[in-house]
Image (cartoon, rainbow, N blue to C red):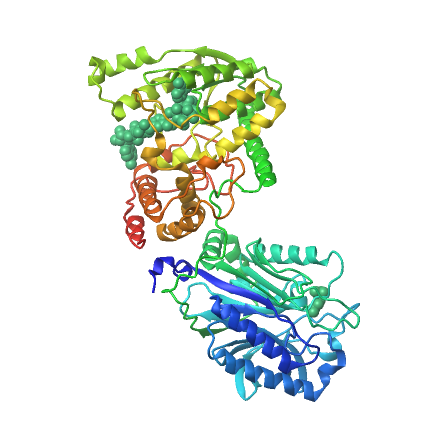
Amino acid sequence: MTHPFFSLHSHGFVRVAVGGPRTRVADPAFNVARTIEMAREADARGASIVLFPELGISSYAIDDLLHQDALLAAVEAALGELLEASRALHPILAVGAPLRWRSRLYNCAVLARRGEILAVTPKVYLPNYREFYEKRHFASGASIAGEEIDIAGRLAPFGSDVLLEARDFAGLVIHAEICEDVWVPIPPSTRAALAGATVLLNLSASDAIVGKSDYRASLCAGHSARCLSAYLYSAAGQGESTTDLSWDGEAMIYENGARLASAERFAETPQLIFADLDIGRLEAERMRQGSFGDCADVEAATRFRRVLFDLEAPRDKNLGLLREVARFPFVPDDEARLAELCFEAFNIQSHGLRQRLQAAKIDRIVIGVSGGLDSTHALLVAVAAFDALGLPRTNILAYTLPAFATTDRTKANAWRLMRALGVSAEEIDVGPACRQMLDDIGHPAARGEALYDVTYENVQAGARTSLLFRLANRHDAIVLGTGDLSEIALGWCTYGVGDQMSHYNVNASVPKTLIQHLIRWCARDAHFGAATAPVLRDILDTEISPELVPGETTQRTEDVVGPYALQDFNLFYTTRYGFTPSKTAFLAFHAWSDAAAGHWPSDIPQDKRRAYDLDAIKHWLGVFARRFFATSQFKRSALPNGPKVSSGGSLSPRGDWRAPSDASANAWLADLEEIP
Ligand SMILES: Nc1ncnc2c1ncn2[C@@H]1O[C@H](COP(=O)(O)OP(=O)(O)OC[C@H]2O[C@@H]([n+]3cccc(C(=O)O)c3)[C@H](O)[C@@H]2O)[C@@H](O)[C@H]1O
Ligand SMILES: Nc1ncnc2c1ncn2[C@@H]1O[C@H](COP(=O)(O)OP(=O)(O)OP(=O)(O)O)[C@@H](O)[C@H]1O
Ligand SMILES: NC(=O)CC[C@H](N)C(=O)O
């Protein structure tokens, strides 16, 4: 017995399997025995649905043997055995069998569970071209709806109109179709998905010809994405007749366009693959993407029957999670994809700025350059934009603005960077202006007392911002904002007269965990010149700090707001899918609790590859929930313009995230208590 938190079933995940047992041509007794063996294995490994290939009980490529009574009787007997065996098993078994109904033969998917046939779905689109002759043997199930079929003495719902809906598992609605059904412009599963099916099964017998595997994969990927669903595909393989064709046993599991698992093709051993589907995520997507529901309204022609069943998925077992959860939702682990993403993100940012400058007929910007990550990156984006517009880099008016806690290292890096890039560079000490303001407002620090509170910090951020805006007036420029998505999410910026404000912010939708990779990508790009790369690398190695409090130890931002790695993770799942804190923590636990597991972006050095335990995850989620929902929305409600960069979103009140500035975080904090 383990805590329900550790069960995937508590968080909207369901484990599914796709199998390809070794079969024997036209031998139902043998084939069902292998099918049952595999179903038992899938059951032992926690699967709730197991999919097998088309006509797997009889074999597919047996031509006129399909019209032999002995064979068809053997199929019925085999299904009887399968039903008996299924009594002791948890999963729904989806097997393929030729079945007689009203003197015609149908190519069917039989969905059985715990000794009962939940549904029998006949194939709708029968291929009858080139190597396929299905119309010689089968009738189409296109017009069959609301009927029943007798199999081995048991009556079961029969028709192309059946959906299986779990009474006890939100969003789990299953539909089955058969091979060619997904090769037509409007597969039956499209309408099933529009009627609520989230898990679409395809029982296939798809002979292998060169290049076909890629095509099947693109069908499954595109179909699962367009249907906002999971798509499970199982094709016949070992033991299918090779009289005139060969079979590769392709098996794949997709979810909303992404491949979660696939089997070895042409394998000699039986293949059984697993994946944990995130049914909650599919529901979240459907709720957000209203056009999915609009399409359902337009295409509401097909009426589906909903057969209800109880999944009885255990919540007291820790089955782990068969799904790699990326540590960095904003940063791909794969080097090539990361480089592509950096190219796109950088160009989105620079294009945004170019358009704004052209529209405003302004050819100068003012930017505060601290020697930290954000202003460095914004400066690189600005340089690229000015180069593209054919404007001199000297039109970029860069200022380094040291105050009480500025370190020699960051100031030196700011200077090296501005010089290497050839922008106009100046230094203005904002210390005196800050001291004046501290004195004006009667702050003890003005008298030399070591009171380094928020007022003390914001006076410095405010002095810099005030100066930058007035410089912009003086030089007909706009102030380029630098604050990143993570800071905006956490409210880690000074409101109004502070770094929260600018004329245009190129970083507003770039999370902190991505910025470092973008800068590294820029460092590799000769575009910024050889002299820039070493300074960029040194900036990347500098501890993240606002440098607002003087002292021997550097003020570490992450000690206050939490590790950006975790907070970006929390931000992504909270805003992109609206997941509860406990589900987010479950995912974070699988992504972050073992530093040796899974993949890391190759740029992250070994000594920075750390783990976070559940206590840390819970603690920082609490900080995130309070800051994000309760205390910082007012800063986002007044956010300057800036381009959306990643699918994780922007937090612009005119774009991805609209929320009240006076909300309570109690609902999220209460949910956190579900975490042990
Ligand atoms: N819902 C609401 N609607 C309207 N106003 C609201 C409000 N909640 C608070 N306020 C008011 O807002 C003010 C507090 O906000 P604010 O002035 O921004 O100040 P605050 O959020 O308290 O502090 C800013 C924090 O950001 C950090 N910071 C600043 C600058 C740069 C960086 C960096 O590393 O990049 C970090 C800084 O160290 C400090 O801890 C108060 O005057 C409060 O009364
Ligand atoms: N010493 C400085 N000189 C010039 N500008 C500064 C300085 N310190 C802060 N700024 C400006 O204020 C912004 C916010 O600064 P801060 O250092 O507090 O946070 P940050 O988000 O870590 O930014 P960065 O990574 O650019 O330092 C900076 O991006 C920069 O534009
Ligand atoms: N069994 C079938 O329906 C096969 C037809 C399908 N087009 C394929 O080759 O995969």
Query: Image quarter for residue 160?
Result: bottom right
Looking at the rendered image, the quarter that the N terminus falls into is: bottom left
Q: Is residue 288 visible?
A: yes
Please state which of residues 568 and 615 is positioned toward the viewer in this rendering.
Answer: 615
Left or right of residue 632: residue 156: right
Please state which of residues 448 and 661 is positioned toward the viewer in this rendering.
Answer: 448
How far from the left and from the top, in percent, is residue 243? 79, 73
Q: Is residue 511 above or below residue 252?
A: above
Q: Is residue 378 visible?
A: no
Ligand 1: quadrant of the figure: top left
Left or right of residue 233: residue 64: right
How far from the left and from the top, in percent, is residue 500? 38, 28
Query: Image quarter for residue 403?
Result: top left
Q: Is residue 381 above or below residue 54?
A: above
Looking at the rendered image, the quarter that the C terminus falls into is: bottom left
How far from the left and from the top, in percent, is residue 599? 52, 45
Q: Is residue 430 above or below residue 555?
A: above
Left or right of residue 603: residue 554: left
How many marks are shown on the rendered structure?
A: 0
How far from the left and from the top, in percent, is residue 225? 57, 54
Q: Is residue 326 above or below residue 525?
A: below
Please state which of residues 569 and 261 is positioned toward the viewer in this rendering.
Answer: 261
